[in-house]
Amino acid sequence: MNKSLKILGVAFLVMSFIWALTQTPSPSTKPETPAFPSTVEQVTITGKTMITPVELTSDGSIWTLNAPPPQPANEAFVAEFIKELRNVRLETVLSRRAMSEDILEMFQLDTAHALTVSVWADKNQKPLVWWVGKNAPDGLHIYVRKPSDPTTVFLAKGMRRERLETPIEKWQAASPEPKG
């Protein structure tokens, strides 16, 4: 009976150890989303597929659309867009070896299709930059890359490509109606 108790004791210790391992939280595998600036002075959206690139600047209270010619921007539209940008979160790493144009083209992250979104907190500092590809099939995510990690493709939540490709007219402030 003494031998049976020893075997049960060892089995209990092994099972307890395995149970403790399964209860220990594993480190997060979610990639870290770069911090979004608390204040934004400039935003640009560029890409070879865009008819007119978007360049927005703020003097702290008023947004200007720097499309030829510079003009007031649609403040509500810009505020909503910046709110969406603040909510973008990297959720998953899809590939750490996206070096070939074929792989990048599959996600529309190649130079012919990707859009570049740059956000400056201060025009004299380096911007936060995303290279944005197509929407994922689920419609809730988008494929992105970061210049600081150009061979990694991320799946991000919080933005749709259509929002970045919004026609320039939507960015413009409404013209006042002529008085007649």
Image: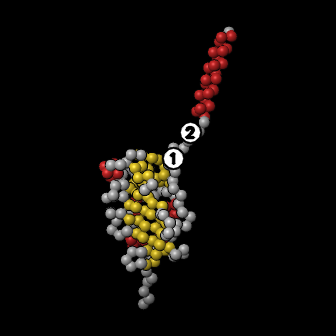
Instruction: Judge whether residue 167 can be spotted in this image.
Output: no
Quarter of the rendering containing residue 52: bottom left
Query: As drawn, is 91 to the left or to the right of 133?
Result: right
Residue at 43%, 74% (x, y): give it. Answer: 65
Q: Residue furthest right?
A: 2
Q: Residue furthest top?
A: 1
Look at the image and tell me in which quarter the N terminus lies.
Answer: top right
**In front here: 89 or 130?**
130
- Percent of width and height locating residue 4: 65, 12
Residue 26's disc is: 2
Mark 2: few, some, or many residues within 10 Å (few <14, many ≥20)? few
Mark 1: few, some, or many residues within 10 Å (few <14, many ≥20)? few
Indicate the colouring scheme.
secondary structure
- Percent of width and height locating residue 3: 65, 11
Look at the image and tell me in which quarter the C terminus lies.
Answer: bottom left
- Percent of width and height locating residue 16: 63, 26
Dot 1 and dot 2 residues touching (CB under 8 Å): no
Check disc 2 and give the amino acid type.
Ser
Task: Count numbered badges in the picture.
Answer: 2
- Secondary structure at badge 1 equals loop
Residue at 58%, 33% (x, y): give it. Answer: 22
Between the C-alphas of marks 1 and 2, the distance is 11 Å
> Considering only vertical position in the picture, is 25 above or below 80?
above
- Percent of width and height locating residue 156: 46, 53
Check disc 1 and give the amino acid type.
Lys
**In front here: 156 or 77?**
156
> Considering only vertical position in the picture, is 60 above or below 115?
below
Instruction: Judge whether residue 176 can be spotted in this image.
Output: yes
Residue 30's disc is: 1
